[in-house]
Image (cartoon, grey):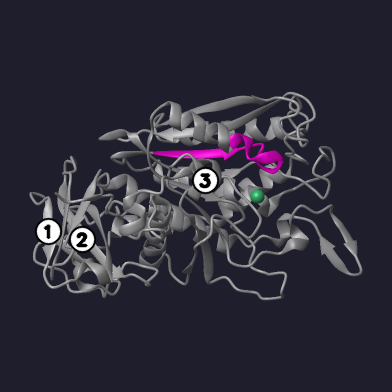
Amino acid sequence: MLRFSAFLLVCLLLAPGPATAQSPEGAPPDYDPAIQSMVEAVDADRIEADVQAMVDVHTRHTLSDTTSDERGVGAARRWLKAEFERISEACGGCLEVKYQKTVVEAGETDRIPSATPVYNVVAIQRGTEHPDRYVLMGGHLDSRVSGIMDSTSRAPGANDDASGVAGAVEAARVLSQHEFESSIVYVGYTGEEQGLFGSTHAAETALENDWTMAGVLNNDMIGNIEGISGAIENTTFRVFSQRRPPDLHEDTWSTRYYGGENDGPSRQLARYVATQAETYVRHLDPILIYRLDRFGRGGDQMPFVDRGFPGVRIMEAHENYNRQHQDIRTEDGVEYGDTIDKVNFGYAEKLTGVNVATMASIAAGPPRPDSVKIGGAVAPSTTLSWTPVDHKDLAGYKVYWRRTAAPRWQHSTFVPADTTQHTLKNVVIDNWFFGVAAVDEEGHESPVVFPSALRD
Ligand SMILES: [Zn+2]
């Protein structure tokens, strides 16, 4: 898929593309004009119309009315399912649209007073070559006001998190016009504010069904550009990532002596998102935050990360607490409430573009190498080896390295598809960290894999 047209190829050759290091002979390009045009197809007005549709149901609180077609979380989930079905109709039925339901029992948390059904709305765009490999974009459909149990007051939740759900819907509109090798999942969770119940159920289901998860992109609040500090700024965004909690991963020889506390799969995904943003979304710089979420707070990526899936939270750079979880009111001249007039849709469009580029690149590209091994102690050179990746237009692999204190990968070299081992001459293993990614002929890469074992 994503073949270059001759015209685009000529444009690409003539145009000054993104700055790149000198590539070795035969290396694929690291820019795909087809992905650029997908990013540019994302439309702020459609995102706004979707946020308006969600705001119009008065409240989407998880404990709100489920029977009315005008009000409450039931109306919201039926709207979202119908919207995914409309998108599917427009692509010849390319989306599998369904509810994913669980029941949260009374007493599981004091935020759920009686047994409550929690629904995720899920749309799957099935991949042509790796149908069981997934990249997922989601946001939460439920909303709240000041009182966490208040399920009747008007809770527009325009930014938190109709913006994230609308981003997923718009991504579905754009990406469903194309075919990809891996599957793409678009989700609206509920039960987030009451305790991440929808995303927990989604992550459990993925685990039970043995999904190979290439990445989980949680989008929660992607439309605010006026910070509580007064800063107004629309050129940066945040990507939160952290490896699964220490008590859940073994303290092995590998994690102790290879380094890698900075190199779990979620951190590699975050770096990947940053590179996609820099490559395809103009006037937008990523801020990588090496935390699971904001200080003392949480989000729908966490249940996935806890189960070993790579997951990140993508969100605005500047939050405004007067516009989150607030009753709508004016106090001492300050307007409180998460209303639609405060959302910046041009900014939500750019953050949706980051997701579109990331999902298109991952879903078009090869799976990551399963297992990467490393060796080179007490030697001048470092050797990496990996299991070959099966992918129809695999070009080869990229071996990455960086200084141990550097936050992002700094160097890479390409090796062709028949290679499963590479020696970096005079790169001393002690002084760098290393990783390997698979890459196809059009330059789509897998996320990087950090070594997990010593070479024999
Ligand atoms: Zn939220």
Quick check: is the Cβ at mark 1 less than 8 Å away from ligand 1?
A: no
Left or right relative to 343: residue 443? left
What is the distance, in whole Å, between disc 1 and disc 2 at their CAs? 8 Å
Q: From the top left corner, tell me how far across and down residue 412 is, in percent.
A: 22, 66
Residue displayed at 44% across by 35% down? 90
**Residue type, label 3:** Ala
> Label for residue 156?
none
Q: Which residue is mark 3?
A: 168
Dividing the picture into quarters, in which one does residue 115 lie?
Answer: top right
Identify the element where label 2 is drawn.
strand
Left or right relative to 238: residue 390? left
Specify which label sits upstream in the sequence, 1 or 3: 3
Q: Which residue is mark 2?
A: 399
Which of the pair 71/22 is nearer the observer?
A: 22
Q: Is 234 above or below relative to 392?
A: below
Residue displayed at 18% across by 66% down? 10
Q: Residue furthest right?
A: 332
Q: CB atoms at circles 1 and 2 under 8 Å apart?
A: yes
Residue displayed at 32% across by 58% down? 257
Q: CB atoms at circles 3 and 2 under 8 Å apart?
A: no
Specify which label sits upstream in the sequence, 1 or 2: 2
Q: Which residue is mark 1?
A: 422
Residue 411 appears in the figure = no
Name the mark nearer the viewer: 1 or 3. 1
**Residue type, label 2:** Val
Q: From the top left corner, tell me how far across and down residue 446 is, in percent.
A: 29, 51
Q: From the top left corner, tell me how far across and down residue 159 is, in percent.
A: 66, 54
